[in-house]
């Protein structure tokens, strides 16, 4: 039987070096948790809520050349700072960092609402993104501080549920607010809700102070931000603004590789690295970031093209196309909720992920088959529901697995790194799907086997507007070309889910700790043994 040793924090408390807080009650956890749910919903909403109102914003502010950057700038800024928030929270504590993130986000929101030009809005979206980059990882980290891993599945499941609902519901809510009020309220609505969450967290979150050496790796953070920005810019602009083999794309690629190399060198020598390389020796951590990245690569990448598919192929109105993606959101919400309860009751997190990824693999096979063969729309909806049910099991469980597998002093950095690679996976998936769609459309529009000659260049540039303006016979040909091209985009999900499934089979399943703080439980290289389960339940 394992011997009980006092944790490092308990030892410091006994010597009088720190003052231990009273045990956190269930009521306090619920209040803090409610505040974080609101904060994370705001961060996720502002990633997608603007898309519906972009035409209205452009008509007021002009600057159509910056249209796509209103979304890209937010994602770029928020993704770049995620690891820094995690590391700083390990050094300075969670409270100062969550306060700073919420404050920066709200200040950026107010500035966006009163922007008078597109360039101003672009700059203010960067400020808003710098705050948003800390909201999701810090919320997950603080829940990890308060709730033992054995019980954490329930909370992480709800987090995944809220995040998915906010991301998918953002465009719908944005359209409603822009029509009923004005686009300014898309940003102003954040203020009262964010302040309420801020006050709730401030009144209920109690954190002990653990002395830590405070040395900020500014150079490492700058190199990581530069490498991330270069990668995201290359993925966003490559194949669209710049050809993939252009000097600009190749230069961006080389610059990104150089910055990644310099970042790795810096992290090897930094006193307090922003992303400790020792995390990459942890098998659970490495597999978790790969699986979550692959999961978001297929779900977010393909998800961008669901509205386009419904509009062009099925002739659904733009205002209704967003609602047709709802089955995926509903499936994710149900799955995340049920999965959290399963983890709490059984202490197991691997089986549901393996089953979910296998279900996702077959879901994408059915989706590709249905979308490429002109099946009724209700079959597409069933496929989306299956995919939502499948992937709602992955992200919450992976966060629990990572937090359970790493040492307590690195939990902030590890959680933030998981969120960081998840975001990179999503952006990579969107870029990959865009490249697949463009290549497929170009190949088919320029093919000599088309029954009707179509102006491929005009159709590629004009998109749905040009397709809908075609004569009936030509429209049928163009719609069929788009059907096959978008089906090839959905096929990326088959590859990603199958690869994620194989990697998850290699994931060690460690006993979930039943208390908060340092643990004497087995290391990540040890599998879950029956005797460990018995001890854990005792």
Image (spheres, rainbow, N blue to C red):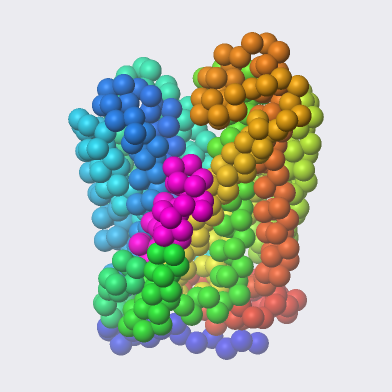
Task: Tell me the magenta residue range.
Answer: 224-253
Please say whether residue 296 is one of the residues in the magenta stretch.
no
Which one is in front, 485 or 30?
A: 485
What residue is at 67 percent from the left and 72 percent from the top? 508
Q: Quick one: quadrant of the C terminus?
A: bottom right
What residue is at 75 percent from the left and 76 percent from the top? 530
Residue 335: image x %, image y %? 65, 45
Residue 386: image x %, image y %? 72, 40
What residue is at 55 percent from the left and 19 percent from the top? 466
Indicate the quadrant where residue 229 lies: bottom left
Which one is in front, 297 or 419?
A: 297
Horizontally, residue 99 falls left or right of residue 359, namely left
Horizontally, residue 106 falls left or right of residue 447, namely left
Which one is in front, 430 or 46?
A: 430
Q: Farthest residue in the top direction?
A: 471
Indicate the quadrant where residue 73 lies: top left
């Amino acid at each position: 039987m394992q011997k009980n040793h006092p944790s490092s924090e308990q030892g410091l408390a006994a010597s009088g070096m720190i003052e231990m807080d009273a045990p956190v009650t269930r009521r306090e956890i619920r209040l803090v948790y409610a505040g974080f749910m609101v904060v994370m919903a705001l961060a996720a909403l502002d990633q997608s809520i603007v898309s519906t109102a972009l035409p209205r914003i452009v008509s007021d502010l002009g600057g159509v050349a910056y249209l796509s950057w209103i979304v890209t700038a937010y994602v770029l800024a928020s993704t770049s700072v995620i690891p820094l928030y995690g590391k700083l929270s390990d050094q300075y504590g969670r409270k100062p960092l969550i306060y700073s993130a919420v404050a920066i986000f709200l200040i950026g929101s107010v500035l966006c609402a009163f922007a008078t030009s597109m360039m101003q809005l672009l700059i203010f979206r960067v400020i808003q993104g710098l705050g948003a980059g800390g909201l999701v990882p810090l919320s997950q980290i603080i829940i990890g501080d308060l709730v033992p891993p054995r019980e954490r599945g329930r909370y992480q499941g709800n987090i995944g549920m809220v995040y998915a609902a906010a991301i998918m519901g953002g465009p719908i809510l944005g359209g409603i607010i822009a029509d009923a009020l004005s686009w300014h309220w898309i940003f102003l609505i954040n203020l009262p809700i964010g302040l309420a969450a801020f006050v709730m967290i401030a009144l209920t979150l109690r954190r002990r102070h653990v002395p830590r050496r405070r040395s900020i790796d500014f150079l490492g953070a700058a190199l990581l931000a530069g490498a991330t920005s270069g990668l995201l810019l290359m993925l966003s602009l490559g194949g669209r603004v710049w050809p993939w083999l252009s000097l600009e794309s190749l230069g961006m690629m080389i610059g990104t590789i150089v910055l990644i190399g310099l970042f790795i060198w810096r992290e090897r020598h930094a006193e307090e690295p922003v992303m400790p390389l020792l995390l990459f020796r942890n098998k659970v951590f490495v597999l978790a970031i790969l699986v979550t990245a692959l999961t978001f690569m297929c779900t977010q990448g393909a998800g961008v093209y669901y509205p386009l598919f419904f509009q062009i192929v099925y002739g659904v109105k733009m205002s209704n196309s967003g609602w047709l993606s709802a089955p995926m959101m509903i499936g994710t919400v149900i799955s995340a909720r049920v999965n959290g309860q399963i983890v709490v009751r059984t202490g197991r997190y691997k089986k549901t992920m393996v089953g979910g990824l296998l279900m996702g693999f077959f879901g994408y096979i059915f989706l590709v088959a249905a979308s490429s063969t002109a099946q009724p729309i209700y079959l597409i909806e069933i496929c989306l529901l299956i995919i939502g049910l499948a992937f709602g099991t992955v992200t919450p469980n992976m966060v629990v697995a990572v937090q359970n597998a790493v040492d307590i002093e690195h939990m902030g950095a590890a959680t933030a790194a998981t969120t960081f690679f998840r975001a990179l996976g999503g952006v990579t998936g969107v870029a990959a799907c865009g490249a697949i769609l463009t290549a497929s459309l170009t190949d088919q529009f320029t093919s000599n086997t088309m029954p009707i000659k179509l102006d491929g260049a005009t159709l590629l540039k004009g998109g749905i507007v040009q397709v809908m303006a075609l004569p009936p016979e030509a429209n049928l040909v163009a719609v069929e070309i788009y059907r096959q091209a978008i089906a090839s985009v959905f096929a990326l999900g088959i590859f990603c889910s199958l690869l994620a499934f194989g990697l998850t089979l290699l994931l060690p399943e460690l006993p979930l700790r039943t208390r908060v703080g340092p643990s004497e439980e087995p290391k990540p290289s040890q599998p879950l043994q029956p005797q460990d389960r018995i001890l854990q339940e005792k």
